[in-house]
Amino acid sequence: MSGVDAAAYVMRLRLPTPAHKLVLLAIATRCDQHYSAFPSRALIAGEALVSEERAKTLLRDLRREGYLSARQRYRGNGSKTSNRFFVHGPWDQWGGTNAPFSEIDHYQDHDDRYAAVRDGDFIPRPASRPDRPAGAGVADNPCPDQGGPTDGGGGADDPSQGLPVTPSLGVTGAPSITGHNEPTEGNRLPDVRRTSAGGKGSSGIRRKQQKTITARPRRRPAGWDEVAAALPREVRPARPNGRLAPTLVRAICIALTGAPGSEAGACPIPSRTPEQLIARINRRWYQARGPERAAADYAGPDRIRRPVGYVADLLTAHECPDLSCEDGLIIGTDEPCAACRARRAEEREAEHARAAVEERLAREAEQRAAREEHEAVAVREEHRVRQQLAAAGHWGAFLDHEVQTHMRRWRDQHLDREGTPHAL
């Protein structure tokens, strides 16, 4: 009766939208003795009359609010299949929290069936009938008007009809919601709400183990304070005791300790001393007119729109494969870096090649435009000559011969030896 119990309880709940209730009902009606089911998302979406994407969102909402828990299932070949959903309710103390869900006012006022669970007492089972053996139990009859399987069946067997019943002195092992006793420390279920049911609790349901994360202050390398004090005022906190931007904190740590190349073929970031980083800030920020370019009223080229990101990049920028190179000079000797010299030579060659290609393309485009203009002028000239000769009485093959002779002379006058048209 787990599916019937779960569906009956879901109907009592006050959910945000009808779609949430339809999705929860699609799972509850298929529950087994563990109040779990594994319908596919497509089936849930079809029964709830929503799309699969909407069903995914509704399932996420139900899991976040604690109505459901889910556990991933796998096939024999290791591939994933539909999740196994666990419906929470009075049968597991609402996911181990002992905090009931909000129900419809009608049930709270007239048919508070689960008040005994909330008050710390077990839910009474229906009284045994004289024509049944002792301890046999009586199934709930949701339709007393139709009668029971025997004579005299009716609403007396259904505790949900508000009739007085005789509490049972014992608690059976049936998974029905009418057969659980008071939650105690021994039988209280763990809180499996808002989890994916990955670990294993006292009820046999696997649920995810909670990890305890302890926040610790980040260790900063030696010399961090000196470099932070040398940062430009444009990137410092506005308040006296304000915190530095996390991007700058991370950039200073990387510049002091070094870092490998983030991508294949990228140069690693070498470690530098605080003095070298302070000199780098002075060279790459102040000598490059950083304060002027970062001003709000600056209208020149290469404006710095985000000073924090710009300073973080200049602290960690290193484009030379020689780790001892610092902006084209070898540290300690101040000699020019051979790798940077070769790289700049390659860049100049590439720039010259790019400029040559752009010039050739521009020249070809100009010639193409001149030819198109020349053809348009030739068409207009041929039309003018043909009309003039026709007006003079020329017609037929003689007219065509005269027009071709004139156009041949006209083209010779307006084209050079390579066929390039002259300026018209």
Image (spheres, rainbow, N blue to C red):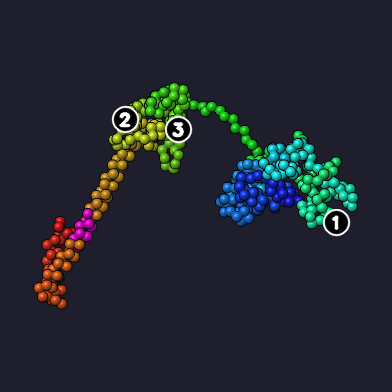
Q: Mark 1 points at which residue?
A: 150
User: In which quarter of the view is residue 192 placed?
Assistant: top right
Q: Which class describes the residues within 10 Å of circle 3: few (<14), some (14-19), or many (20+)?
A: few
User: In which quarter of the view is residue 339 placed?
Assistant: top left
Q: In which quarter of the image is the C terminus?
A: bottom left
Q: Closer to the camera: disc 3 or disc 1?
A: 1
Marking on residue 190 = none
User: In which quarter of the view is residue 346 placed?
Assistant: top left
Q: Main secondary structure of the magenta part?
A: helix
User: Residue 343 colored magenta?
Assistant: no
From this view, report whether residue 73 is shown above or below residue 213. Answer: below
Residue at the extreme left of the image, as rendered = 392
**Which element carries disc 2, helix, strand or loop?**
helix
Marking on residue 292 = 2
The reply to whether callout 3 and callout 1 are in contact (CB within 8 Å) is no
Picture coordinates of residue 128 (x, y %)? 86, 48
Q: Residue at x 38, y 32 (%)?
A: 307
Q: Residue at x 45, y 30 (%)?
A: 245
